[in-house]
Amino acid sequence: MKPSSVAGVLLLGLLPLVLASTVAAQDNVTIPKSRLEELERKEKELERLKGNLGKTNDAKAQLKKENEKAAAKPPAPPTAASSTTNVAPAAPAPSDSEVERLKSELTKTKDENLRLKQENEKAAVRLQAAPVVSYVSPPMASLPRLKPEDIVEAMDLANYYHADAAAADQRYRKQKFTVRGEIVGFEKPPFVTNYRILLKTPDRAIKVICELNPPENANAVFTVNHGEELVALAGERRVPMLKVGDTVQVAGWCRGANGPDVNFSGTDLRVAR
Protein backbone atom coordinates (compact mmCIF):
# COMPACT_ATOMS: atom_id res chain seq x y z
CA MET A 1 0.00 0.00 0.00
CA LYS A 2 1.17 3.44 -0.85
CA PRO A 3 2.17 5.79 1.94
CA SER A 4 -0.33 8.41 0.77
CA SER A 5 -3.13 5.90 0.96
CA VAL A 6 -2.13 4.97 4.50
CA ALA A 7 -2.17 8.61 5.53
CA GLY A 8 -5.62 9.06 4.04
CA VAL A 9 -6.93 6.06 5.95
CA LEU A 10 -5.48 7.40 9.19
CA LEU A 11 -7.07 10.81 8.64
CA LEU A 12 -10.43 9.25 7.96
CA GLY A 13 -10.13 7.25 11.15
CA LEU A 14 -9.18 10.28 13.29
CA LEU A 15 -11.89 12.57 11.80
CA PRO A 16 -14.77 11.24 14.00
CA LEU A 17 -12.64 11.77 17.12
CA VAL A 18 -11.82 15.33 16.17
CA LEU A 19 -15.44 16.10 15.40
CA ALA A 20 -16.61 14.60 18.72
CA SER A 21 -14.09 16.60 20.73
CA THR A 22 -15.10 19.76 18.88
CA VAL A 23 -18.77 19.19 19.60
CA ALA A 24 -17.99 18.48 23.23
CA ALA A 25 -16.01 21.70 23.49
CA GLN A 26 -18.85 23.67 21.97
CA ASP A 27 -21.35 22.21 24.47
CA ASN A 28 -19.09 23.24 27.36
CA VAL A 29 -19.04 27.02 26.42
CA THR A 30 -22.54 27.58 24.89
CA ILE A 31 -24.92 29.93 27.05
CA PRO A 32 -28.70 29.76 26.51
CA LYS A 33 -30.21 32.84 24.83
CA SER A 34 -32.70 33.55 27.65
CA ARG A 35 -29.90 33.53 30.23
CA LEU A 36 -27.83 35.86 28.09
CA GLU A 37 -30.73 38.31 27.76
CA GLU A 38 -31.27 38.24 31.53
CA LEU A 39 -27.60 39.01 32.18
CA GLU A 40 -27.74 41.89 29.72
CA ARG A 41 -30.80 43.36 31.47
CA LYS A 42 -29.13 43.12 34.88
CA GLU A 43 -26.04 44.78 33.49
CA LYS A 44 -28.13 47.70 32.16
CA GLU A 45 -30.00 47.98 35.50
CA LEU A 46 -26.68 48.05 37.36
CA GLU A 47 -25.43 50.85 35.10
CA ARG A 48 -28.67 52.82 35.73
CA LEU A 49 -28.38 52.42 39.51
CA LYS A 50 -24.78 53.57 39.37
CA GLY A 51 -25.93 56.69 37.50
CA ASN A 52 -28.68 57.46 40.02
CA LEU A 53 -26.28 56.96 42.92
CA GLY A 54 -23.89 59.40 41.36
CA LYS A 55 -26.63 62.03 40.94
CA THR A 56 -27.76 61.56 44.56
CA ASN A 57 -24.24 62.00 45.86
CA ASP A 58 -23.83 65.17 43.77
CA ALA A 59 -27.12 66.59 45.15
CA LYS A 60 -26.04 65.83 48.72
CA ALA A 61 -22.75 67.52 48.19
CA GLN A 62 -24.46 70.62 46.71
CA LEU A 63 -26.93 70.80 49.60
CA LYS A 64 -24.12 70.49 52.13
CA LYS A 65 -22.26 73.38 50.49
CA GLU A 66 -25.36 75.60 50.54
CA ASN A 67 -26.00 74.82 54.22
CA GLU A 68 -22.41 75.68 55.08
CA LYS A 69 -22.72 79.02 53.22
CA ALA A 70 -25.99 79.85 54.97
CA ALA A 71 -24.50 79.07 58.39
CA ALA A 72 -21.49 81.27 57.66
CA LYS A 73 -23.68 84.35 56.86
CA PRO A 74 -24.39 86.80 59.75
CA PRO A 75 -28.09 87.12 60.81
CA ALA A 76 -30.01 89.74 58.82
CA PRO A 77 -30.92 92.91 60.77
CA PRO A 78 -34.66 93.48 61.47
CA THR A 79 -36.48 95.32 58.71
CA ALA A 80 -37.92 98.78 59.17
CA ALA A 81 -41.47 97.43 59.03
CA SER A 82 -40.85 94.93 61.81
CA SER A 83 -38.96 97.41 64.01
CA THR A 84 -41.57 100.15 63.73
CA THR A 85 -44.69 98.04 64.23
CA ASN A 86 -47.14 99.97 66.37
CA VAL A 87 -47.89 98.16 69.61
CA ALA A 88 -50.68 99.54 71.76
CA PRO A 89 -49.43 100.35 75.25
CA ALA A 90 -50.82 98.13 77.95
CA ALA A 91 -53.72 99.63 79.85
CA PRO A 92 -52.80 100.60 83.38
CA ALA A 93 -54.06 98.16 85.96
CA PRO A 94 -56.86 99.55 88.12
CA SER A 95 -56.00 100.29 91.71
CA ASP A 96 -57.25 98.09 94.54
CA SER A 97 -59.69 100.76 95.67
CA GLU A 98 -61.12 101.10 92.17
CA VAL A 99 -61.58 97.32 91.92
CA GLU A 100 -63.38 97.25 95.25
CA ARG A 101 -65.64 100.13 94.22
CA LEU A 102 -66.60 98.40 90.97
CA LYS A 103 -67.31 95.16 92.82
CA SER A 104 -69.54 97.00 95.27
CA GLU A 105 -71.50 98.73 92.49
CA LEU A 106 -71.92 95.43 90.65
CA THR A 107 -73.26 93.74 93.77
CA LYS A 108 -75.73 96.59 94.37
CA THR A 109 -76.93 96.42 90.76
CA LYS A 110 -77.46 92.67 90.97
CA ASP A 111 -79.36 92.99 94.25
CA GLU A 112 -81.55 95.77 92.85
CA ASN A 113 -82.36 93.78 89.69
CA LEU A 114 -83.26 90.72 91.78
CA ARG A 115 -85.52 92.79 94.02
CA LEU A 116 -87.28 94.37 91.02
CA LYS A 117 -87.79 90.96 89.45
CA GLN A 118 -89.32 89.60 92.62
CA GLU A 119 -91.63 92.59 93.02
CA ASN A 120 -92.75 92.37 89.37
CA GLU A 121 -93.56 88.69 89.87
CA LYS A 122 -95.60 89.49 92.97
CA ALA A 123 -97.45 92.25 91.12
CA ALA A 124 -98.29 89.79 88.32
CA VAL A 125 -99.66 87.30 90.85
CA ARG A 126 -101.72 90.03 92.49
CA LEU A 127 -103.19 91.04 89.13
CA GLN A 128 -104.15 87.44 88.36
CA ALA A 129 -105.90 87.19 91.72
CA ALA A 130 -107.89 90.41 91.23
CA PRO A 131 -111.66 89.84 90.91
CA VAL A 132 -113.29 90.21 87.53
CA VAL A 133 -115.14 93.53 87.33
CA SER A 134 -118.48 93.82 85.58
CA TYR A 135 -118.31 97.00 83.54
CA VAL A 136 -120.27 98.10 80.48
CA SER A 137 -118.87 100.88 78.26
CA PRO A 138 -121.03 103.09 76.03
CA PRO A 139 -120.89 102.09 72.35
CA MET A 140 -117.84 103.63 70.72
CA ALA A 141 -119.88 104.66 67.68
CA SER A 142 -122.03 106.88 69.94
CA LEU A 143 -119.05 108.86 71.24
CA PRO A 144 -118.32 112.42 70.04
CA ARG A 145 -115.10 113.23 68.19
CA LEU A 146 -112.05 112.80 70.40
CA LYS A 147 -110.33 116.03 71.51
CA PRO A 148 -106.89 116.48 73.18
CA GLU A 149 -108.51 117.74 76.39
CA ASP A 150 -110.81 114.70 76.72
CA ILE A 151 -110.48 112.26 79.62
CA VAL A 152 -110.96 108.58 78.74
CA GLU A 153 -111.53 106.01 81.44
CA ALA A 154 -109.01 103.14 81.39
CA MET A 155 -111.93 100.71 81.81
CA ASP A 156 -113.54 102.02 78.61
CA LEU A 157 -110.25 102.09 76.67
CA ALA A 158 -109.60 98.43 77.55
CA ASN A 159 -113.16 97.43 76.61
CA TYR A 160 -112.96 99.14 73.22
CA TYR A 161 -109.62 97.51 72.29
CA HIS A 162 -110.83 94.14 73.55
CA ALA A 163 -114.02 94.34 71.47
CA ASP A 164 -112.51 95.71 68.22
CA ALA A 165 -108.83 96.62 68.20
CA ALA A 166 -108.90 97.94 64.61
CA ALA A 167 -111.82 100.29 65.31
CA ALA A 168 -110.22 101.41 68.58
CA ASP A 169 -106.98 102.19 66.74
CA GLN A 170 -108.95 104.37 64.32
CA ARG A 171 -110.21 106.47 67.21
CA TYR A 172 -107.38 106.43 69.78
CA ARG A 173 -104.03 105.38 68.30
CA LYS A 174 -101.54 108.27 67.92
CA GLN A 175 -104.11 110.61 69.47
CA LYS A 176 -103.42 112.92 72.40
CA PHE A 177 -105.79 112.73 75.39
CA THR A 178 -105.85 111.89 79.12
CA VAL A 179 -106.50 108.41 80.48
CA ARG A 180 -107.83 107.99 84.00
CA GLY A 181 -107.88 104.90 86.17
CA GLU A 182 -107.02 103.10 89.39
CA ILE A 183 -103.46 101.84 89.88
CA VAL A 184 -103.24 98.06 90.28
CA GLY A 185 -99.49 97.67 89.90
CA PHE A 186 -96.10 99.04 88.82
CA GLU A 187 -93.35 97.84 86.51
CA LYS A 188 -89.75 99.07 86.72
CA PRO A 189 -87.59 97.39 84.05
CA PRO A 190 -83.90 97.12 84.99
CA PHE A 191 -81.27 99.29 83.28
CA VAL A 192 -83.82 101.91 82.12
CA THR A 193 -85.03 105.10 83.82
CA ASN A 194 -88.68 104.93 82.76
CA TYR A 195 -91.32 103.30 84.93
CA ARG A 196 -94.80 101.94 84.13
CA ILE A 197 -98.19 102.28 85.83
CA LEU A 198 -100.75 99.52 85.35
CA LEU A 199 -104.36 100.70 85.41
CA LYS A 200 -107.40 98.66 86.34
CA THR A 201 -109.52 97.12 83.55
CA PRO A 202 -112.67 94.95 83.51
CA ASP A 203 -110.61 91.92 82.41
CA ARG A 204 -107.50 91.11 84.45
CA ALA A 205 -105.92 89.57 81.32
CA ILE A 206 -105.92 93.04 79.75
CA LYS A 207 -103.82 95.93 81.06
CA VAL A 208 -103.64 99.61 80.26
CA ILE A 209 -99.93 100.37 80.66
CA CYS A 210 -98.80 103.99 81.05
CA GLU A 211 -95.06 104.57 80.62
CA LEU A 212 -93.57 107.74 82.12
CA ASN A 213 -90.24 109.40 82.74
CA PRO A 214 -89.12 109.93 86.35
CA PRO A 215 -89.56 113.41 87.89
CA GLU A 216 -86.94 115.98 86.90
CA ASN A 217 -85.40 116.18 90.38
CA ALA A 218 -85.23 112.38 90.84
CA ASN A 219 -82.05 110.35 90.48
CA ALA A 220 -84.06 107.12 90.15
CA VAL A 221 -87.49 105.60 90.63
CA PHE A 222 -88.12 102.20 92.19
CA THR A 223 -90.80 100.19 93.99
CA VAL A 224 -90.91 99.34 97.69
CA ASN A 225 -93.17 97.40 100.04
CA HIS A 226 -93.31 94.36 97.75
CA GLY A 227 -94.22 96.43 94.73
CA GLU A 228 -97.13 98.21 96.46
CA GLU A 229 -95.54 101.68 96.39
CA LEU A 230 -93.46 103.75 94.00
CA VAL A 231 -90.83 106.13 95.38
CA ALA A 232 -88.35 108.55 93.83
CA LEU A 233 -84.77 108.98 95.01
CA ALA A 234 -83.90 112.68 95.24
CA GLY A 235 -80.26 112.87 96.30
CA GLU A 236 -80.17 110.56 99.32
CA ARG A 237 -83.84 111.12 100.21
CA ARG A 238 -86.71 108.82 99.29
CA VAL A 239 -89.84 110.67 98.17
CA PRO A 240 -93.15 108.70 98.01
CA MET A 241 -94.85 109.08 94.63
CA LEU A 242 -97.71 106.61 94.16
CA LYS A 243 -99.25 103.50 95.67
CA VAL A 244 -101.54 100.74 94.51
CA GLY A 245 -105.16 101.91 94.78
CA ASP A 246 -104.45 105.53 93.83
CA THR A 247 -106.55 107.00 91.02
CA VAL A 248 -104.42 108.92 88.51
CA GLN A 249 -104.83 110.95 85.36
CA VAL A 250 -102.08 110.48 82.76
CA ALA A 251 -101.91 112.88 79.82
CA GLY A 252 -100.09 111.69 76.73
CA TRP A 253 -100.38 109.67 73.52
CA CYS A 254 -101.99 106.30 72.87
CA ARG A 255 -99.61 103.85 71.18
CA GLY A 256 -102.27 101.25 70.46
CA ALA A 257 -102.44 97.60 71.46
CA ASN A 258 -99.57 95.19 71.94
CA GLY A 259 -101.20 91.81 72.29
CA PRO A 260 -103.91 92.10 74.95
CA ASP A 261 -102.41 95.25 76.49
CA VAL A 262 -103.04 98.88 75.59
CA ASN A 263 -99.91 101.07 75.69
CA PHE A 264 -99.89 104.75 76.56
CA SER A 265 -96.94 107.18 76.61
CA GLY A 266 -97.45 109.63 79.44
CA THR A 267 -96.13 113.18 79.49
CA ASP A 268 -97.91 114.40 82.64
CA LEU A 269 -99.15 112.63 85.76
CA ARG A 270 -101.66 113.82 88.35
CA VAL A 271 -103.18 112.04 91.32
CA ALA A 272 -106.96 112.43 91.38
CA ARG A 273 -108.24 113.62 94.78
Image (cartoon, rainbow, N blue to C red):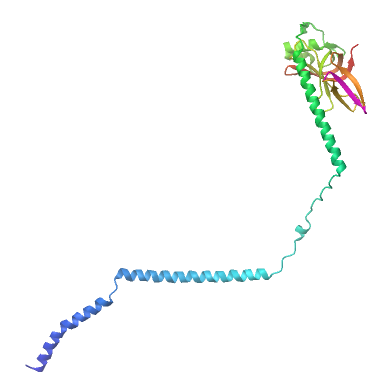
- Indicate left or right for 53 with 178 as reference: left
The quadrant in which the C terminus is found is top right
Query: How far across and how far down the image is residue 1, in percent?
Result: 6, 93
- At horizontal 61% and vertical 71% (from top left) the residue drawn is 65
Give the quarter of the image for residue 144: top right
Q: Between residues 41 and 118, which one lies in front from this camera angle?
A: 118
Above or below for 198 versus 219: above
Which secondary structure class fits the magenta region best? strand
- At horizontal 19% and vertical 80% (from top left) the residue drawn is 20
Q: Between residues 178 and 125, which one lies in front from this camera angle?
A: 125
Residue 129 seen by the camera:
yes
Q: Is residue 229 magenta?
A: yes
- At horizontal 43% and vertical 71% (from top left) the residue drawn is 47
Residue 206 seen by the camera:
no
- At horizontal 79% and vertical 27% (from top left) the residue drawn is 114
- Indicate left or right for 237 with 160 as reference: right
Give the quarter of the image for residue 24: bottom left
- Indicate left or right for 80 with 232 as reference: left
Please state the extent of the stretch shown in magenta in the rendering: 227-236
